[in-house]
């Protein structure tokens, strides 16, 4: 068992509740001795930190589906790494695990909250992407909330992001016609050329509305919304009868200092007898294994493509998070930490 | 069979597409000879004209769930009256019927579009209220879209109006806790004292938010929305987990010259895993008889109370319609026409 007594753990703490866009000064970098795991705990050296839009809401005070991170606390994050020390018989040193590790190099996790993953079956990063929460979110959101069926038209926003790309690909596998909304011609051709979407709409185009109408001439049966704001409104104007609108996120709104605008076209729900429904993926935890088995199979067969957008080093965290809100990423945004333990 | 050749039919025509609030000059009164019914048609003398919020949208050009009334055309309206002449063997002179009669004294209806009603079982006006579209709207909206169950809290806006009063009373009969939103202390005490609501919230009160929180301390399982706008937003802030928001109408928004604000709090749908769904009552036409049988029984037993707000004479139509949007009515807004045929 390696000695960890003299390891230093570099950490990223929440320093301030951001007003509007995230600033470097909203975080503070610090270091502490690596904590020793107690009975039933694991010491994990983190290799990937998951950078997610939901982080923005954890930084705010106030009511959400999860409590806020306190000022001075290590910023909350999911991540993946390798066990350095185990005080639980179900885990061995060297095992790969995922969990809520925080934005730091080393984490002490409760063994019951850690998930062992098989890096022989898929790369570690995939367990933070298609084989993790983004994949599960797409899977249950599209199929259980959106009730997408073969032959239907599925429209997804944030389509080049982790969840959006998964939604579109799963819809394609299920026999749907798939249209993605993304920012810029590069992302749009990535959707159609690489991921097999039927069409893509560049929301930054001045003709976005017209392009959407052309891409969905018969309207939309399922709209999976990751972004909110004007794009949600535009999508609501294209519903078909009995359409389902899945509210997964609203990345365009998270930086608002005041509550953003609501969807002005919500009366489309009446005209088209449509439904708009929100969900939180954690409710599906008892069924993650089912989703992971199916997604692994599609990944292995090449039907699903897992793409990550990786920045290196803990210090890149504020930039990585901003990149999400600027629509800079293609694929799952991750922070990669060095393979060698930083020793003092 | 009475001779109708020399009867004059007073009519209210749509004269202009209103900008904002309805003006007298948006309508034009005119008269024409009473038309003769052809084979399969009925000549009906109208006794009640139904005055409905949906009329406002029929006056606008543009996409809705029903086509617009043309300028110069008799204003579309549901109504009830007695048959003066029948060219269909299923109907007799003197039968009471309901149908889309228009805002006029006499109508020629296709027999297949007319519904014979039993004025021995309930007063004629009830067939435009609890035993007609408003009652069916409340019944299917609350039970089939809202899925209200005994023990749940049901919140309804426009609660002193025809649909709202029916929603609240049906919810009470089904064993729900019922809270109504209405304008002014008089309507609020009508809800609790006369209709048996558990609580009422006066949206005109500066403390409306606090009153709503007090009236729904554990939140709302079903919110039935007739009004839209700020009240919808306020209700969205009080949802319980897995709440259902039924979008029936948006009477606060119909006079807007621009599209109104959307519900800023729609992300409550995510936080509370809630659903917002629109419906149009005409989809339930094959099941009207089921609703009418149940509603008739409740009406006969005194569990349901049918209230109408009646103005007399065709000329009162613009005022009656405005009254709806000013929140002036308590119960179903109706226009009553004289019992004697106006002859030249």
Image: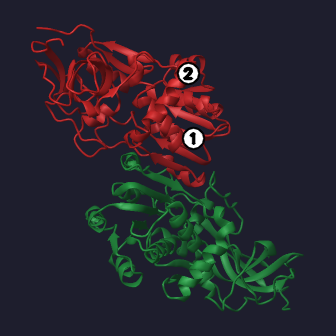
Chain colours: A red, B green
Please tell me whether residue B233 is drawn above or below residue B141 in the rendered image: above
Q: Where is residue A281 shown, x and y percent of the image?
A: 40, 39
Q: Which residue is mark 2?
A: A191
Mark 1 element type:
strand
For mark 1, does the 10 Å Cα neighbourhood hold few (<14), some (14 to 19), or many (20 or more) residues?
many
Quadrant the N terminus of chain A occupies: top left
Residue for point 77% across, 88% down = B344
Q: Which mark is residue B198?
A: none
Viewer-closest of B136 and B252: B136
Q: Which mark is residue A222?
A: 1
Residue with the most extreme front position: A89
Q: Where is residue B131 shown, x and y percent of the image?
A: 60, 79
Label 2 marks which chain's residue? A
Looking at the image, can residue B337 be seen?
A: yes
Please tell me whether residue A171 is drawn above or below residue A32 in the rendered image: below
> Could you tell me how far apart the alpha carbons at marks 1 and 2 are, in whole angstroms?
18 Å
Label 1 marks which chain's residue? A
Residue for point 33% across, 70% down = B202
Viewer-closest of A93 and A282: A93
Viewer-closest of B11 and A163: A163
Indicate left or right for B217 with A330 as reference.
left
């Amino acid at each position: 068992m390696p000695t960890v007594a003299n390891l230093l753990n570099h950490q990223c703490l929440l320093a301030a509740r951001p007003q509007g866009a995230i600033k470097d000064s909203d975080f503070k970098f610090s270091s502490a001795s690596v904590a020793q795991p107690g009975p039933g705990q694991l010491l994990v050296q983190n290799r990937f930190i998951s950078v997610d839009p939901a982080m923005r809401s954890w930084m705010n005070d106030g009511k959400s589906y999860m409590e806020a991170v306190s000022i001075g606390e290590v910023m909350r994050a999911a991540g993946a790494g390798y066990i350095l020390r185990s005080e639980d018989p179900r885990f061995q040193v060297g095992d790969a695990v995922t969990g809520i590790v925080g934005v730091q190099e080393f984490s002490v996790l409760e063994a019951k909250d850690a998930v062992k993953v098989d890096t022989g079956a898929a790369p570690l990063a995939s367990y933070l992407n298609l084989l993790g929460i983004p994949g599960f979110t797409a899977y249950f959101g599209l199929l259980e909330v959106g009730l997408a069926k073969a032959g239907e038209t599925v429209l997804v926003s944030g389509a080049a992001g982790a969840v959006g790309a998964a939604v579109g690909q799963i819809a394609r596998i299920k026999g749907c016609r798939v249209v993605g909304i993304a920012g810029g011609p590069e992302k749009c051709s990535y959707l159609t050329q690489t991921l097999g979407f039927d069409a893509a709409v560049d929301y930054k185009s001045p003709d976005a509305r017209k392009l959407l109408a052309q891409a969905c001439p018969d309207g939309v049966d399922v709209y999976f919304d990751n972004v909110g704001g004007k794009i949600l409104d535009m999508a609501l104007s294209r519903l078909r009868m009995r359409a389902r609108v899945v509210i997964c996120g609203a990345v365009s709104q998270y930086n608002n200092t005041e509550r953003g605008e609501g969807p002005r076209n919500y009366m489309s729900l009446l005209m088209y007898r449509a439904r708009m429904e929100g969900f939180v993926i954690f409710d599906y935890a008892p069924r993650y294994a089912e989703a992971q088995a199916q997604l692994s199979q599609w990944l292995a067969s090449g039907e699903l493509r897992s793409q990550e957008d990786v920045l290196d080093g803990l210090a890149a965290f504020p930039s990585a998070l901003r990149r999400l809100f600027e629509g800079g990423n293609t694929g799952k945004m991750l922070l990669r930490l060095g393979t060698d333990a930083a020793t003092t």
